[in-house]
Amino acid sequence: MEIKNNELLRQFEYKDETRKIVVEYVNQEKKIFLTKVNISEDTEEEIINEFFKKIMNCIEEQNHKVVPSHPKIVNFIKKNPIYKELLPVGIRI
């Protein structure tokens, strides 16, 4: 799976022939606020989870922290506690 960090539109994107997933973000200092998720209706849960994992890995490589503002991303972090280390101090899920 190849994701694109579209810095101009401030969103992570994944596209294939039938699906499109977009996660919009706001970058402030060393924190990335994941604010909005747009997912095609026919997208399987496995693909969504893989996309979120790639986003988390990208954020980790940049040495940033993540602030999930969307319920889908909050649920993803709850199900995958290894990504809780990316949360800034004071943010609990």
Image (tube, helix red, strand yellow):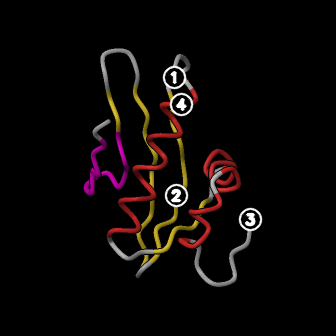
**Residue tagged by mark 1?**
43
Residue at image point 27% right, 45% down:
4
Identify the image quadrant of the N terminus: top left
**Residue tagged by mark 4?**
46
- Give the residues drawn in magenta, as a range: 3-13
At label 2, the amino acid type is: Leu
Picture coordinates of residue 76, whole percent (x, y)? 63, 49
Q: Are marks 2 and 1 in contact (CB under 8 Å)?
A: no
Residue at image point 31% right, 43% down:
3
Q: Which mark is residue 93?
A: 3
User: Splitting the image into 4 quarters, where does residue 90 fall?
Assistant: bottom right
Earlier sequence position, callout 1 versus callout 3: 1
Q: Give how far apart the Cα atoms at labels 2 and 4 are.
A: 20 Å
Q: Is residue 30 above or below residue 55?
A: below
> Mark 3, mark 2: which one is toward the viewer?
3
Earlier sequence position, callout 2 versus callout 4: 2
Q: Are marks 4 and 1 in contact (CB under 8 Å)?
A: no
At label 3, the amino acid type is: Ile
Residue 4 painted magenta? yes
Q: Are marks 4 and 3 in contact (CB under 8 Å)?
A: no
Q: At numbered mark 2, what does the secondary structure look like: helix, strand or loop?
A: strand
